[in-house]
C-alpha cells in the first residue's frame, strides 16, 4: 500500500463533520463550531474530496450520513477522543486543576447548586477556568464518553462501566401540593399514597422523571398525562392546581412567591431521595485530581442534604 500523507487531514475538519452528524443540520453545526455555514460546508466538501467519499446525503430538509459516512464518522470520533486524551495527559503532568475544566450538570440541579458552589471553587482553585454545560443525563454521559466534557454532576449511579464517580451528597425529595390538595392536610405522607393520577412528571429525558416513577411504581396509567418541560414549569403547574409532584430539596430555595399556592411536606422514607455524584471517564489520567475536586465539593454540602461518606 502506498504512503498517504496526513498533511491534508485536519482535526478541525473532523470536528465539523462530527458536529453535522450530531445536529443533522449544517447551520446549527456551524454555530456550534463558531464558523460560518459556508466555511463549514466548504471544509466538509474538501474532506470528502480528500477521503474520496460522500459523507452526507444533503437536501433542503434532510441531512444524514451515508453508509460509508457512518463508518468514517465513527472513526473520526475515535480520532478526536484520542487527540483530547493526548492533551489531557499533557495537562495531567503539570497542573490538572489549572486551566479549562469542562463541567456538565443536569438541569434539575445546576440552577440551585452551582451558584453556591462557584465562590468556593474560585477560592480553592484560583487558576481554574470552569466551562459549564447544562444537559440531560444521556447527553452529558455521551459528551463524557466522547471527551467533550471532563466532568459531570449527575444523579448516580450511572449505567456505564466506562465512567468513574464519587458520591457527593444525598438530596431528599419533598412532596409539593396545591394548598387545597387532600394529601396536604395529612401530618405524615407515605410513598404509597403518592401513586395517584394527579402526580405531575417532567418530560422524557429528565432523570428526575425516572426517579419519581421508581418511587411510585404503581402509578395509574393516564390517558393524557401532563408533563412539564422544567422544574420551573412544574412549580407553576402545581401552583395552578393541576396536581402535585416530588421536588428536590435544593429547588425549594427562594419560593416565597408560591407560599400561598402550595404546601410542602417532608417524606420520611429513605427511598424519597437521590444521590448526586461527580462523574468522569474511567480512562481519564486525571482521575486522582478529580477525586480531589470531589472532596472539595463535599466541603460545602448544601443545607438539607447529607454528605456521602468515602
Image (spheres, rainbow, N blue to C red):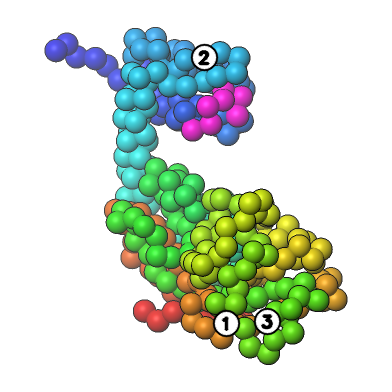
Label placed on residue 58? 2
How far is the residue under mark 3 from the one under mark 2?
A: 54 Å
Residue 263: in magenta span = no
- Helix or strand or loop: what does disc 2 sit on? strand
- What is the chief secondary structure element of the magenta stretch? helix
Q: Is residue 18 above or below residue 264?
A: above
- Residue 158 in sight from this viewpoint: yes
Q: Residue furthest left?
A: 1
What residue is disc 3 on?
A: 265
Number of residues whose C-alpha sits closer than 10 Å to that of mark 3, classed few (under 14), some (14–19) or many (20 or more): some
Name the foreground residue: 58 vs 133. 58
Q: Earlier in the sequence, mark 3 or mark 2?
A: 2
Q: Earlier in the sequence, mark 2 or mark 1?
A: 2
Q: Is residue 57 above or below residue 188?
A: above
Q: Residue furthest bottom?
A: 187
Number of residues whose C-alpha sits closer than 10 Å to that of mark 2, classed few (under 14), some (14–19) or many (20 or more): some
Q: Which residues are magenta?
A: 22-28
Label placed on residue 45? none
Quadrant of the image containing the N terminus = top left
Which residue sits at x=47%, y=49%?
A: 138
Name the foreground residue: 75 vs 251. 251
Disc number lying in front (2 or 1): 1
- Helix or strand or loop: what does disc 1 sit on? loop
What residue is disc 1 on?
A: 190
Q: Earlier in the sequence, mark 3 or mark 1?
A: 1
Choose top left, top right, bottom left or bottom right for residue 53.
top left
Amino acid at each position: 500500500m502506498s504512503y498517504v500523507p496526513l498533511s491534508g487531514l485536519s482535526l478541525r475538519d473532523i470536528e465539523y463533520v462530527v458536529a453535522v452528524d450530531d445536529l443533522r443540520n449544517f447551520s446549527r453545526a456551524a454555530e456550534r463550531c463558531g464558523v460560518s455555514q459556508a466555511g463549514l460546508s466548504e471544509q466538509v466538501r474538501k474532506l470528502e474530496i480528500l477521503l474520496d467519499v460522500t459523507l452526507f446525503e444533503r437536501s433542503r430538509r434532510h441531512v444524514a450520513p451515508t453508509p460509508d459516512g457512518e463508518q468514517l464518522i465513527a472513526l473520526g470520533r475515535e480520532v478526536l477522543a484520542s487527540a483530547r486524551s493526548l492533551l489531557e495527559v499533557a495537562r495531567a503532568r503539570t497542573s490538572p486543576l489549572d486551566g479549562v475544566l469542562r463541567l456538565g450538570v443536569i438541569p434539575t440541579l445546576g440552577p440551585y447548586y452551582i451558584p453556591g458552589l462557584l465562590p468556593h471553587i474560585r477560592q480553592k482553585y484560583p487558576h481554574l477556568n470552569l466551562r459549564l454545560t447544562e444537559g440531560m443525563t444521556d447527553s452529558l454521559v455521551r459528551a463524557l464518553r466522547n471527551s467533550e466534557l471532563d466532568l459531570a454532576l449527575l444523579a448516580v449511579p450511572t449505567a456505564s462501566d466506562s465512567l468513574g464517580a464519587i458520591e457527593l451528597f444525598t438530596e431528599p425529595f419533598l412532596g409539593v401540593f396545591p394548598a387545597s390538595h387532600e394529601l396536604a392536610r395529612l401530618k405524615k405522607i407515605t410513598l404509597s399514597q403518592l401513586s395517584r393520577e394527579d402526580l405531575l412528571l417532567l418530560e422524557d429525558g429528565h432523570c428526575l422523571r425516572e426517579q419519581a416513577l421508581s418511587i411510585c411504581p404503581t402509578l395509574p396509567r393516564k390517558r393524557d398525562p401532563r408533563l412539564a418541560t422544567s422544574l420551573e414549569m412544574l412549580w407553576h403547574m402545581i401552583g395552578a392546581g393541576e396536581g402535585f409532584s416530588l421536588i428536590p430539596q435544593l429547588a425549594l430555595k427562594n419560593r416565597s412567591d408560591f407560599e400561598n399556592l402550595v404546601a410542602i411536606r417532608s417524606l420520611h422514607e429513605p427511598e424519597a431521595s437521590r444521590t448526586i455524584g461527580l462523574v468522569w471517564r474511567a480512562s481519564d489520567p486525571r482521575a486522582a485530581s478529580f477525586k480531589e475536586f470531589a472532596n472539595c465539593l463535599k466541603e460545602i454540602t448544601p443545607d438539607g442534604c447529607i454528605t456521602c461518606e468515602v
